[in-house]
Amino acid sequence: MAGKGWVVRSITKEEIEETFGIRAVLESYAAYLATERVTDALIARLDSAIGAYREGLTHRDTEALMSANTQFHEMIYKASGSQKLYSLINNFRDFISRYRRAC
């Protein structure tokens, strides 16, 4: 079976830019939907994630920054109340994540 296997296609700059653009639109819509369903509890959780982000900035802790950022956005996606939208955003996030790991 020589010569058989997987071929990994590289991601172009245009694909990355398009993906970020589409994801931005989806995330904006998720944020809009979340405002329709916002609760005091959600605001408190978002505020906590912002606090964690600030703490990461203070300590120049990249892992903490990425974790707080992901947590913040996850809360908004879920607060949108749309499982389909959540799934679409995660598909684009996974695509971008593969690119980041390759760099």
Image (tube, rainbow, N blue to C red):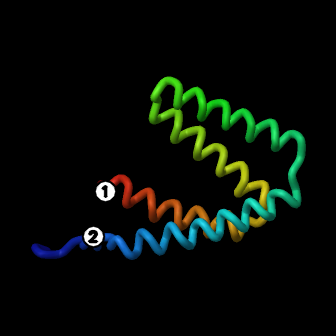
User: Is 94 situated left or right of 86 in this image?
Assistant: left
Q: How many marks?
A: 2
Residue 69 marker: none
Amino acid at dot 2:
Val
User: Is 13 situated left or right of 89 in this image?
Assistant: left
- Of labels 2 and 1, the one closer to you: 1
**Secondary structure found at label 2:** loop
Percent position (x, y) of residue 89?
61, 65
Label 2 vs label 1: CA separation? 11 Å
Q: Residue at image x 41%, y 69%?
A: 16
Amino acid at dot 1:
Ala
Above or below: residue 8 compared with residue 93:
below
Above or below: residue 12 compared with residue 43:
below
Residue at image mark 2: 8
Q: Residue at image x 47%, y 74%?
A: 18
User: Is 99 situated left or right of 47 in this image?
Assistant: left
Q: The N terminus appears in which quarter of the rendering? A: bottom left
Residue 102 marker: 1
Above or below: residue 59 compared with residue 95:
above
Above or below: residue 5 compared with residue 99:
below
Q: Residue at image x 63%, y 43%?
A: 71
